[in-house]
Amino acid sequence: MDLDAITKHSALHAKPSGLILQYGTAGFRTKAEHLDHVMFRMGLLAVLRSKQTKSTIGVMVTASHNPEEDNGVKLVDPLGEMLAPSWEEHATCLANAEEQDVQRVLLDISEKAAVDLQQDAFVVIGRDTRPSSEKLSQSVIDGITVSGGQFHDYGLLTTPQLHYMVYCRNTQGQYGKATTEGYYQKLSKAFVELTKQAFCSGDECLLLKVDCANGIGALKLREMKNYFSQGLSIQLFNVGTTGKLNHLCGADFVKSHQKPPQGIEMKPNERCCSFDGDADRIIYYYYDADGHFHLIDGDKIATLISSFLKELLLEIGESLNIGVVQTAYANGSSTRYLEDVMKVPVYCTKTGVKHLHHKAQEFDIGIYFEANGHGTVLFSKTAEMKIKQLAEELEDKKRKAAKMLENIIDLFNQAAGDAISDMLVIEAILALKGLTIQQWDALYTDLPNRQLKVKVADRQVISTTDAERKAVTPPGLQEAIDDLVKKYKLSRAFVRPSGTEDIVRVYAEADSQESADSLAHEVSLAVFQLAGGVGESPQP
Ligand code: G16
């Protein structure tokens, strides 16, 4: 590495003085205008990580669900997973180093992580449709080239597509072909195979309306539509021609406001879904005949998938070990249903798919979904081999079930939660089981809940424990929450600092919507008072 050249180029991507950022829930995120130096430095870091792992590393430029003005960056590790925690620390150190310290920090990281600097490096880059993304990804490329790395710029990609590319490249194509065409072919082939015998009558069950959040999902779904000449008819809304990214639309908006996005025409009982800005989350919803809005979130997606997989395993007579992973945001009814009715073990981790993914790897079949619609299913190598073998050996109905499992393995993006792949899995399951969206929704009834955001001077004053379900600091906050929770029936509440936005998140659930709203509001006030709220105090 030519350290002098790096220093020279680094000065062209100067860090704004006093700016401190942290590698959070999903990488760095803040206003796009503050990110040029971070992008350059993440180019440098990706080269080091590539040299150390002797593998291709991914860099995704996106701020996913955040407003259009924000941007962000995250690194993707060799098997398509999120960056290892120790490297998150290196990323934070490098991003915050003052200009004169960049060389030293790079050498420190190389030494601590035993990076062989003579090793070749290869990095792949993807970006979302934000106006700032193209220029910022150019800064990543500057960082890669000046540190002697090779790269391939995929340009516009969904985040899960970039994870997929990295996984394919590091498994020498075994996982799939590392092109968007390869991705479309793999998923559509599995979908078509899986739904071959689906019972589906009338046009209704084939039509799905998709809110694309004015983001990359629209472009990629449009490309992919050509691969489905039959089987599924999708109609796209919020495709980015007029509206702003994630503004009044998209999965995060629908989930947190519990109402439909703007810009979509919904008729009663029509199946609709929303992607988020980089198409790694999906949420379903519909209006019933009485005009009531129903939200089907990540918890219900996990339940649908778990019950389908359990049925297939029962059919083939194989008892692979299944686990479902959720976070504190999981609706209490979903956890009870999974544990008590479906008899599936459920685990709770901290927010952030990196934590859920890690836990899910402990099972033969690890199903993980955040309530916000971010998730996927992981199959262990042993499970995959067993299923493949059974698909050859078994006969009749059992063989059919094993074949279905084989196809569903291919349909899931096992590198990361993926709105396109999850959508196809859900559509296939609904068609195969002949389920309407109402029947799916009726699996269990969600406890009324509310999520709020509180602005504080420094959100790091709040620290948590017990998978974020209890606040440790500031003093008195958890006691205040405990007292408030006691006032309501079937209630639960927690607070945590967001890792993607400069706010504190508040979650509350209770036996009625009124109680959930009121509890969330009271907890917000406690946060505002005890954790240094700024601006206007929370209004009911
Ligand atoms: C990211 C993470 C998710 C997380 C979400 C919110 O989503 O990938 O795992 O749930 O942020 O995180 P926080 O509550 O810490 O702000 P996305 O879709 O924005 O990448």
Image (cartoon, grey):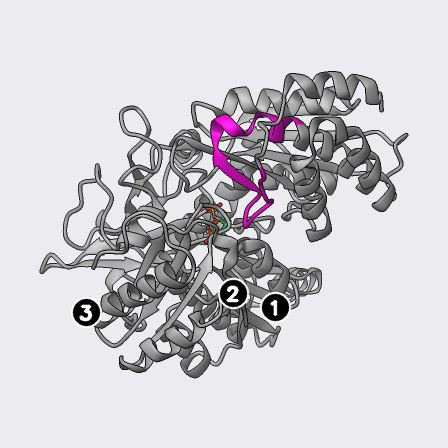
Which of the two labelled residues, at mark 3 and mark 2, occupies the earlier sequence position?
2
Mark 2 burial class by Cα count in 10 Å: few <14, some 14-19, many 20+: many
Does residue 197 appear anywhere in the picture? no
Q: Quadrant of the N terminus?
A: top right
Tell me where residue 235 appears, x and y as whole percent. 28, 37
Quadrant location of residue 75? Answer: top right
Label 1: which residue?
394
Q: Is residue 105 left or right of residue 371?
A: right
* Kind of residue at disc 1: Leu
Does residue 25 appear anywhere in the picture? yes
Between tags 3 and 1, which lies in front?
3
Between 498 and 268, the one nearer to me in the picture? 498
Q: Is residue 404 above or below residue 132?
A: below
Q: Badges 3 and 1: C-beta atoms under 8 Å apart?
A: no
Which SS class for mark 2?
helix
In the image, what residue occupies the spot 58% across and 57% down? 406
Magenta residue span:
20-40
In the image, what residue occupies the spot 81% across and 33% down? 104
Mark 3 to mark 2 CA distance (whole Å): 45 Å
Label 2: which residue?
401
In magenta stretch: residue 36: yes
Between tags 2 and 1, which lies in front?
2
Between 77 and 400, the one nearer to me in the picture? 77
Q: Is residue 474 left or right of residue 258?
A: right
* Mark 2 close to ligand 1, CB under 8 Å: no
Q: Quadrant of the C terminus?
A: bottom left
Disc sitting over residue 514 in the figure: 3
Which SS class for mark 1?
loop
Q: Is residue 13 above or below residue 280?
A: above
